[in-house]
Amino acid sequence: EYCFWLSKNAVNGIGGTWYTGEGFESSQSISIIHDYDLNFDSLDDIKTNFKVTVFHDNTKYLFKIGDLINIIHSSILTCPDMFVQPTDIKNPYTNVPFTTATLYNIYVKLIKNKITPSILFSAFFKCGFDINKFVVLYEPMILDEYLKKYVMDLSKDRKFSIIFEMLRKYKTT
């Protein structure tokens, strides 16, 4: 089985030129095949271009691209009490943070499959997947995206409750 890899001299990105390579096979890797995605849906029914094999800690993990996007967004949109505090993007099977090279591989796989990465993931890529730099440069954008997601995730009843509370609190006479 082949793994998609990326070296530091690869993909045309910020800070230099980057090249991607395909067909890198690691004879020392342990192949773990998952028949189900993170929602326990069968991966057999998913087209190949919507799946990605991630080589992480000498092990191959098969993910649905949508699952990886959700993991990435959950991590970079962490805002406890409305304070931007992105967390490391972790492998859900091991809870170990993905390496920078693995994140580059995921980003390139999205581009290669003509899937447009989100604004935040693209910004994170431009920062070389450096969380501190990402927060400093993009804090307003992160908070804005978090607030959009927060409002979208609220139930209809909760939205009404919050609106009534705001009207009552800020009512002018």
Image: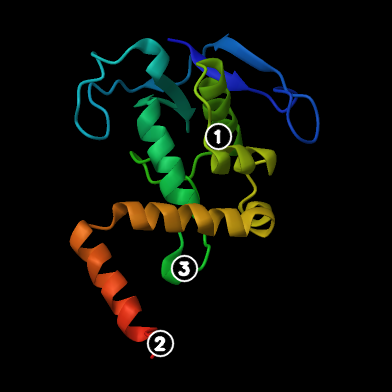
Judging from the image, the colouring scheme is rainbow
Within the image, what quadrant is residue 156 found in? bottom left
Pick whichever, 92 or 73, lies toward us: 73
Q: Name the residue under label 2.
A: 172
| Residue 21, position as x, y percentages in the image | 63, 13
Spatial distance from mark 3 to mark 1, Cα to Cα? 26 Å
Earlier residue among tags 3 and 1: 3
As helix, strand or loop, the secondary structure at mark 2 comes to: loop
Q: Name the residue under label 1.
A: 103
Within the image, what quadrant is residue 105 found in? top right
Question: Label 3: few (<14), some or many (≥20) within 10 Å?
Answer: few
Please state which of the two labelled residues, at mark 3 or mark 2, is closer to the viewer.
2
Amino acid, disc 1? Leu
| Residue 87, position as x, y percentages in the image | 49, 55
Of all residues, the one furthest to the bottom in this rendering is: 173
As helix, strand or loop, the secondary structure at mark 3 comes to: helix
Earlier residue among tags 2 and 1: 1
Earlier residue among tags 3 and 2: 3
Spatial distance from mark 2 to mark 1, Cα to Cα? 50 Å
| Residue 131, position as x, y percentages in the image | 61, 52
Residue 94 drawn above or below residue 62: below
Q: Name the residue under label 3.
A: 82
Pick whichever, 144 or 43, lies toward us: 144
Spatial distance from mark 3 to mark 2, Cα to Cα? 26 Å
- Who's the residue at 43% across and 35% down the image? 69
Image quarter hosting the C terminus = bottom left
